[in-house]
Amino acid sequence: MVTEAILSALSNVLTFQHIQYLMIGVVTGLIVGVLPGLGGIVGMSLLLPFVYGMEPTLALAMLIGILPVLSTSDTFASILMGIPGSSASQATILDGFPLAKKGQAARALSAAFSASFIGGLFGAVVLTVCVLVARPLILSFGAAELFMLTMFGLSMVGTLAGNSLSKGIAACAAGLALGAVGAAPATGEYRMEFGTLYLMNGLPLVIVGLALFAIPEIGDLLRRNSAIAQEGSPIGAGWKQGLKDTWVYRWLTLRLAALGAVLGMIPGLGGSVVDWIAYGHVVQTSRDKSQFGKGDIRGVIAVESTTASKDGGGLVPTLLFGIPGSGSMAIFLAGMVLIGLQPGPSMVSTNLDVTYTIVWSLALANVLGTALCILLAPAIAKITIVRYPLVAPFMILVITFAAFQPNRSLYDLVALVVLGIVGILLRRFGWPRPAFLIGFVLATQSERYLYQALQFSGWNSFQRPIVLIIAAIIILSIGFSMYSQRKSGTKIEVEGKSAATATTAMWPQVAFTLAIMGLFVFTFVETINLSQLGRIFPVSIALVGMVAAALVLWPQIRGNRASGAVFDAESKEPAESEGPMTPLKYIGWLVGFVASIAVVGYFLAVIGFFVAFLRIIAKAGWLQTLLLTLLGAIILMILTSALNLILPEGLLQQYFYDRLPWPLVS
Amino acid sequence: MQATLRRLKGAVAAAFVAASLTAAAPAAAQEVDFSGQTVEWWIPFSEGGGSDVWARFFAPYLSRHLPGNPNVIIRNVPGGGSITGTNEFAARARPNGLQLLGTSGSTQFPFLLGDSRVRYDYADFQPVLVSPTGGVVYIPASAGVADASELGELGETELVYASQGATSLDLVPMLAFEVLGLNVRHVFGMTGRGDGRLAFERGEATIDYQTSSAYLTNVVPLVEAGTAVPLFSYGVLDAEGNLQRDPSFPEIPHFIEAYEMMHGEKPSGVAFEAYMSFFGSGFAAQKPAMLPKDTPENIVQAYRDAFAAAAKDPELIASAGEVLGDYEQAVGDGVVPLYKVATTIDPDAREWVRTYLNENHSVMLD
């Protein structure tokens, strides 16, 4: 019966009409993936309005078509610009962007595409088999097991902490504290939300990710005031080299594809930490760690293979139990319901042919998506030879647009800028941002699953075999990492190298450490009066964070410049090529942009920002300025009307709501 | 200032409409024409949620049956557990029939509980459609209970329920268990009913409910395999407001029948009243579609007629299965009583629930 279903599904998929609809999904996914910060949720939302009334298998093809190409095409932004293409590809930046800066973007891209291709196909194979047998596996992951998986994720902080373990732990604790904002999972009490509706569900991940990685990177590129690619050729040669790299590390690629499929299959962990687990894993298991963070191709291959295969794995619980593993899967499920399919056990009995139509569509979309990415790569890469100040307004447009997707609110942008400033400072003072992000991503889950495990079955649940196995894996991986680190004597540098700090003043970093300390004190004071279940998690984090921050502070105060805790990127030799954009000015522009949104609304503010920025910073002529502004406005109008959005509004809209035309008011 | 002005304008418009209605009532109803216009259906949840699917399902039929066949689009305004978007709609939607709001139990509950962040009043809105839904409560076969009449044999045995939160839709089963007198521990923090079902299948949770379509696809196989036993359905309300068996599960007793099977008498008291209010708001009249305050009568009537025609549309009936279930949609003039059930609560019952939540789950609603 199974082979029959597989074959009949294949003949379904290989029709012109099916491929046509699949291509609609693939192209949507490609566009959404290339634009930084936008991910599967936006892609699925774009297509959902068309689903109702469509032929079921065609609708499925269209929605499925988005998935594989997303995890391939979001690589562009990560590698070429150092901006997370989506929440799932943040770890690609760590090695991909340094490679691009070295003029090896082509190598990094081709390695990423090929690894992603293999990972995607592997995921489809896993889905084919596991959808039939994975039910017991998924049911064996209860709250305690999921909690241990979050611990596994957090243990990666040890690997990604860079030069100073206490800094890594403090950064992770700060992320956990930020993640604790909003309703407590155990009691529903609100924590640190300042009485606002905005913060009651916590801060959205996409904002934190963009604030930590995109905002600082754009500022840094503006400062250098040149194109991203420093050598002549946009992406350099090396397409073959990248394929060779994936071939050389083929076992690594497959191993991580398997890891991705398994992590994707377990509902509840969420896709956005998988890339960090993959990155941590490849660093831990590599003997020579000296190049990680500076452009080690293994870092790119590992992450891309894992994130591509997790989609196939993630469809297993979605189809078997109707449980969405991520935001985009939730919309996919809605699409299934709209065409009259309720996922559940029937997906492996009466609806088996539908399941295999999905599998084949996934595999075919993977092939098509990879081909499209390769075809478009030279054109897309040209962006790196454009003078960056001309690109920056578009980047700021796209990331602010992405940032207000979760709540469609002005506060989303305020949060983006405030956290963006934090990101700039974290980067400057060498606090590992990956550790911060891992903490943030896992904050809610780790608290929720610990609480649920204890509530469901007490401490006994931590004696279950899978819990013990994961515990052993955690201990082994940390041990192995420490052993190989001691042997080779190298540490990974996720925040670049700090040059001689002898000449710079110490007070800025002391002040920043004190501010982080202040955050922990605040967390402690804010949450200590809640009920036992609501406070235990944030209070513990605050205490751990305070100790770690104190350990960072001590050498900084003593002025021990040899310590790993002392770091100030500003102490690098002032670059001779430095442009007109100092960090302070950059922050001023961002704040000014958001402030102008609060006055005239998003659309007019974007126009004003484009004109001012292109004239003053990019020193563009009027014609160029107007053309680029027009282009920005058109992109914005297309996205707004396609998604049927309300753009963040300001005072103008508040007072003249009835008298303004679209898109000033919507 | 702006708001007062708009209110004034609304009042003038209403007075004008009232005047014109008395003059030529039948003619006015025909004047409504949305040709070439776009109706925005606001959903205060993000894409892919239950309410989003519900609105997307109805949208094409609404378009087909409204005068002038306007384009109907769904506008998602998520955030703040659906309070934000509803607040915004209440503050600024224009009473011209081009903006429509669809909410759910999780928007009604904070309103009924008197949450201070709520800035909308359901009494202001004009209901044009109310969609009911249902669900079935079940327990593992290993509990040794064959049906609701044997529930008393559980005694003080503690059952575990995997809940999405004390003030979420899972407030309804919480109150149901309280009224029945079951000893249930609520484990919070689930992200959907699917999570709860998974916890049940893993054996972590020992009592659960699923909404109708999820029950049919995912729990019925467990019942057939002999691992789960249905206890009761929430039931549906008829036109007189009496509880009836759920049309999807005619063989399963509804809540009041289950209570009688267990206790030998009808339920009564303030806890039961509170349960019935939240059951009404969360299930029997879960999803209302409403026009803003001060919408002229002829527009309201046009919408009520359109939904009434949509509900009879053979195409809609043929494809309603997964989205609407077997439930009869409240349309036309039938919306008013059901809407009242969804959006009103006796003050004593409200106070009782607030105290109950505060004492048992330290929920503060100021």
Image: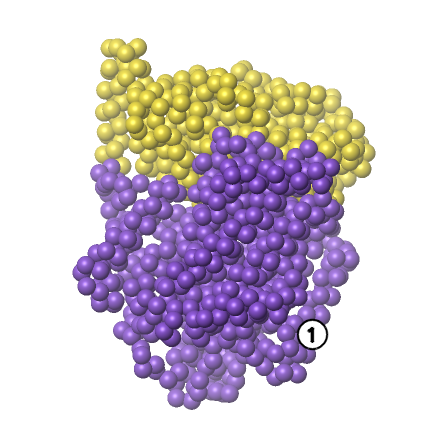
Chain colours: A purple, B yellow
Q: Position of residue B167 (x, y in %)?
A: 55, 40
Which quadrant of the view contains residue A150?
bottom right
Q: Which secondary structure, mark 1?
A: helix
Q: Position of residue A357 (x, y in %)?
A: 61, 40
Task: Give the total number of marks visible in the rendering.
Answer: 1
Residue furthest left in the image = A622
Q: Residue at x 66, y 23 (%)?
A: B249
Drawn side of residue B347 relative to residue A257, left or right:
left
Dot 1: few (<14), some (14–19), or many (≥20) neighbours within 10 Å? few
Q: Residue at x 51, y 50 (%)?
A: A368
Q: Can the viewer see residue A144 in this picture?
A: yes
Q: In the rendered image, which quarter contains the N terminus of chain A? A: top right
Drawn side of residue B71 relative to residue A658, left or right:
right
Give, as a three-letter code, the residue at label 1: Gly
Q: Position of residue A92 (x, y in %)?
A: 51, 65
Closest to the observer, A289 or A553: A289
Q: Can the viewer see residue B100 in this picture?
A: no
Residue furthest bottom in the image = A502
Chain designation of label 1 = A
Q: Residue at x 75, y 32 (%)?
A: B223
Q: Position of residue B199 (x, y in %)?
A: 69, 44
Badge 1 is on which residue? A479
